Image: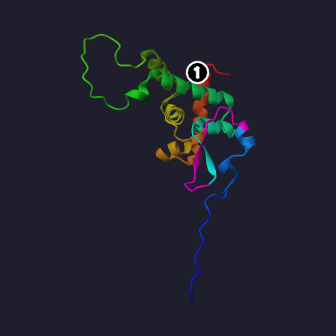
Amino acid sequence: MVKKKKRNKPLNVRQDRADHGTPEALAQADGIKFETVDGGRAGAQKRVYISRQTPLDRYKDRGIITDVQYRAGYHLFVLWDKTKAAQNITSSYDRVIVDGGGGGSGLNEYAYADFIALQREMGRELSSVARAVCVECESASAWAKRFRLPSRMGIEKLRMALDVLARVLRIS
């Protein structure tokens, strides 16, 4: 018995409407950067990927968190960005002459002190999930799995953390 040769799927056929993005969807995407990537074949349609979107943005777009919670999370991200601590995560082996003077570390001490004060106000567990989602761009379910919690518990903890953060920052 002769086996039939299996036909390969053509690469330029749409798998889903969202793969290539309808003009209406692209027009309504306010503030989101799209990038197109070709399929590798001549004449292939280009797929559309959202290149700059954080989990916090996706949760707001899907209605999982409110606008107030989103603004509180975004404020935490901006505060972390102001500290310039993200640049200091890796070690530097540059020769530094210590003269006992202040400054020089590149870290914004005032913003970092505010960031630490917000984390203290939120508590250990809530600050952990807020930092994971807002700063490190990790999903809430991945955070929950890391701490051996049910995956749905991550979004609940995130909502609680963002509510506390909004209350502390007086965002309404």
Q: Position of residue 165 (x, y in %)?
A: 58, 26
145 within the magenta span: no
Q: Quadrant of the C terminus?
A: top right
Residue 43 placement: quadrant: bottom right
Q: Picture coordinates of residue 153 (x, y %)?
A: 58, 43
Residue 67 picture location, percent across and down: 68, 29
Report the side of 134 relative to 110 (left or right): right
Quarter of the rendering containing residue 108: top left
Q: Amino acid at mark 1?
A: Val
Residue at image point 24% right, 17% down: 97
Q: Is residue 164 visible?
A: no
Q: Which residue is mark 1?
A: 168
Residue extending furthest top?
Answer: 101
**Residue 42: percent from left, percent from top:** 58, 55
From the viewer's side, name the closer residue of 128 and 2: 2
Magenta segment: 27-43
- Residue lying at 65% horizontally and 31% vertically, measured from the top left: 31
Q: Is residue 158 above or below residue 101?
A: below
For this rendering, which residue is in front, 144 or 11?
11
- Label 1: which secondary element: helix
Q: Residue at x 68, y 49 (%)?
A: 18
Residue at screen point 64% across, 52% down: 45
**Callout 1: few (<14), some (14-19), or many (20+) C-alpha neighbours within 10 Å?**
few
Q: Number of numbered discs present?
A: 1
